[in-house]
Amino acid sequence: FQWRDNVRNSVVENARKVITSPGIYTLTLPTGTGKTIIGLQLAMDIAERFNASGIIYVLPFVSLVEQNAEVASRLFDYVQEDHHLAYFNKDTKELEEQYDLDQKFIAVFRYWRDPVIVTTMAKLWEVLFSPRGNDSMSFHRLSRAVVLLDEPQSIRAQCWEGFGNTLKLLSEKLNTTFIL
């Protein structure tokens, strides 16, 4: 569909003019325009321009993570799908057979290792706010990253002030770019 290509090219071209430094930005498009592809291309363009440490694509539901990780895998060489069901069957014998030591570590701790992460809002929330070390061990991956927050309206209204302040702080102190 030519019109989708035109929209994508226009969004990326306009974003190059508007997004000149890390910060918090919004992308609003009608249903059916291809926001997933546009968002990922925009994130890739920003990551290249800002020499970002990676791209973190955050979605509200596991089903959307699975679906969009597949799309991201067509665009990027290394994509890590991260949600509580993504790594292994709880059967430890199966875990022993399928994974090497590094993979077991990543599976148990859900460490973000690849340049592109597709994860849930719940996991991002844990990385940002959990007092447990295991939950927050990927926090440093937010530094200089491009974070694409899809469906941000799924965040409860009473959380937005604190969450917004957190995004602002990360943007200012860690040079993180957020696209909502």
Image (spheres, helix red, strand yellow):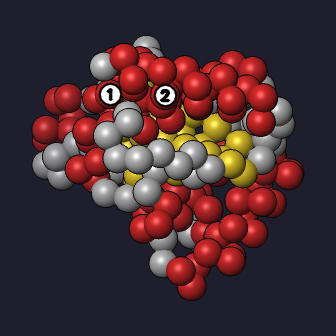
Marks 1/2 in contact by CB < 8 Å: the verdict is no
Where does the N terminus fall, quadrant-wise? Answer: top left
Residue at 58%, 30% in the rendered image: 11
Q: Secondary structure at mark 1?
A: helix
Residue at 37%, 17% in the rendered image: 2
Tag on residue 71? 1
Instruction: Relative to 98, say whether 121 is above or below.
Output: below
Instruction: Relative to 123, say whether 75 is above or below.
Output: above
Residue farthest along the bottom direction in this orientation: 158
Horizontal and vertical percent position of residue 122: 43, 63
Horizontal and vertical percent position of residue 157: 53, 80
- Amino acid type at circle 1 is Val
Residue 125 visible within the image = yes
Q: Earlier in the sequence, mark 1 or mark 2?
A: 2
Distance, label 1 to label 2, CA atoms, is: 18 Å
In the rendered structure, the answer to whether residue 52 lies left or right of residue 107 reads: right
Horizontal and vertical percent position of residue 55: 57, 33
Q: Nearer the viewer, residue 30 or 12?
A: 30
- Amino acid type at circle 2 is Val
Category of crowding for the residue at label 2, using alpha-carbon neighbours closer than 10 angstroms: few (below 14), some (14–19), many (at least 20)? some
Instruction: Relative to 85, say whether 122 is above or below.
Output: below
Residue at 29%, 48% in the rendered image: 64
Tag on residue 7? 2
Residue 113 visible within the image = no
